[in-house]
Structure formats: structure tokens, C-alpha cells
Amino acid sequence: MLVLLCCCCCCLLLATQQQQLQPAAGGNRASPSCIPHERDALLAFKHGVTSDPGGVLNSWRRDGRHDEQDCCRWRGVRCCNRTGHVHELRLGGPSIFESPPSNNLAGQISPSLLALDHLEHLDLSWNDLAGSTGRLPEFLGSLKNLKYLNLSGIPFYGGVPPQLGNLSRLQYLDLSWNDIDLSWLTHIPSIQYLYMDGVNLSTVADCGFVS
């Protein structure tokens, strides 16, 4: 009887240990790393940034440890936990009302962003990313999965390219403190939140929407 009792105790202890180990194994399941061509696209975007005094993009690098090469771990980058695709870029800088603009990014918005097919959230606000032309890039209209776009405080001027009317899924748009034409907004019926602080609306014709 004593031997049988010892065997039962050992079996019970082994079963308990296995139950304890199973959740731990599931909890350690690693999230997928970023997609290689999307990482290259982000590095190309960084190449278009000529000034980064605040070191915002310092973590964006190809060399170093594995976790440093995983763009899903880079500052301002958010990836889908299931697929590893880049879903969000949160690179908005401090506004001129909060700190000197010299702390923000300067340069241009690289068309390499077009490789981010799953990008839904893009915030580049309060950075000097108007480039040499000062015009809002036409290729932004090809980011058709965008739901959130914040370009406030970027020193764009002139007309907005009609290509932005292709952003049929766009729900949030912030163009505050820009000197641009807004008549194209009627072509984006999905917009739910529109911010235009500091925008001169006196030259806007009857666009058929209420601000």
C-alpha cells in the first residue's frame, strides 16, 4: 500500500508541474518580427530626414542586436502582433507652442512609405518635412488603407493634390496650421474628424461640407 501511495503522489506531482509549464510556454511565444521590405522602407524614410536633433530615429538601424534590427521595436513604429506588418507610424513632434521647432525632424517625406501596404495610422505632425518643393506629396494618396492622417504644423503651401481624394477609408484628418487649399475634401466622404486650426478658410469656395 505504501508503494502504491508513493506512486500516486509522484504522478500527481508530475501532472501539476506539466500544467504549470504549459501557460509559461504559451506566454513566451514571440511576436513576429517586422517584414524585411517594410524595414527597408522605414530606413529609406530615415534617409530622407536631414536633421534629427532629438534622436527620434536613433533606434532605426539595420546593424546591432536582433532586437535592434526588428523595426517593430523602433521608436514610433507599431506593428500587428499577428502578422508583423507596420500598422502605425507615430512620429509627431512637439508643436511650436510646446518647444522650439529645432527639436523636430527636418527633411522630406520619402515615397518609400508606399511599401507599407498595411499602414493605417500616420502622424508626422509638427515636423519640417515639406522638402525642397514645400508641396504636399501626391503619393500620400496611394496609402489607401490610411484611417488616420495628421500633417498639422508641416509648412506645406499651395494646392492639395487631388490624389488624396483616393483615401476612401480616411476617418481622421488634421491639416491645422497649413497654408493649403481645402476644396478637395468633398471627395473623402469617410472623414469623421477634421481639424483645421490656424487654416485660412476665407478663400475656400462652397465645398458642400460643414466644418
Image: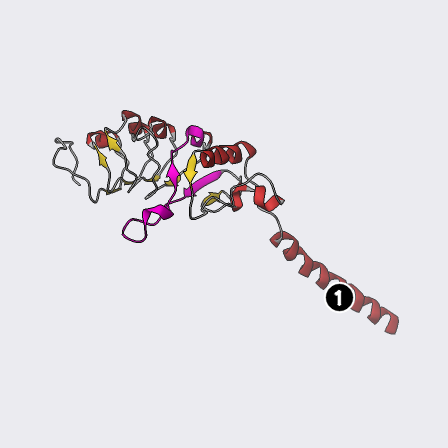
Q: Is residue 55 left or right of residue 20?
A: left
Q: Is residue 29 left or right of residue 89?
A: right
**Is the residue 5 above or below the residue 202 in the image?**
below
Q: Residue at x 27, y 34 (%)?
A: 156
The quadrant of the picture occupied by the C terminus is top left
Q: Residue at x 41, y 29 (%)?
A: 111
**Is the residue 97 above or below the residue 180 in the image?**
below
- For label 1, the crowd category at 10 Å Cα-Cα, with few meaning under 14, some 14 to 19 and many 20 or more, is few
- 200 is within the stretch colored magenta: no
Instruction: Name the residue beneath numbered marker 1.
Output: 13
Residue 28, given in percent of the width and then of the height, sits at 62, 52
Residue 194, given in percent of the width and then of the height, sits at 24, 41
Amino acid marked by disc 1: Leu
Q: Is residue 1 visible?
A: no
Depth check, front residue: 19 or 197: 197
Could you tell me which secondary element the residue under label 1 belongs to? helix
Q: Residue at x 48, y 39 (%)?
A: 86
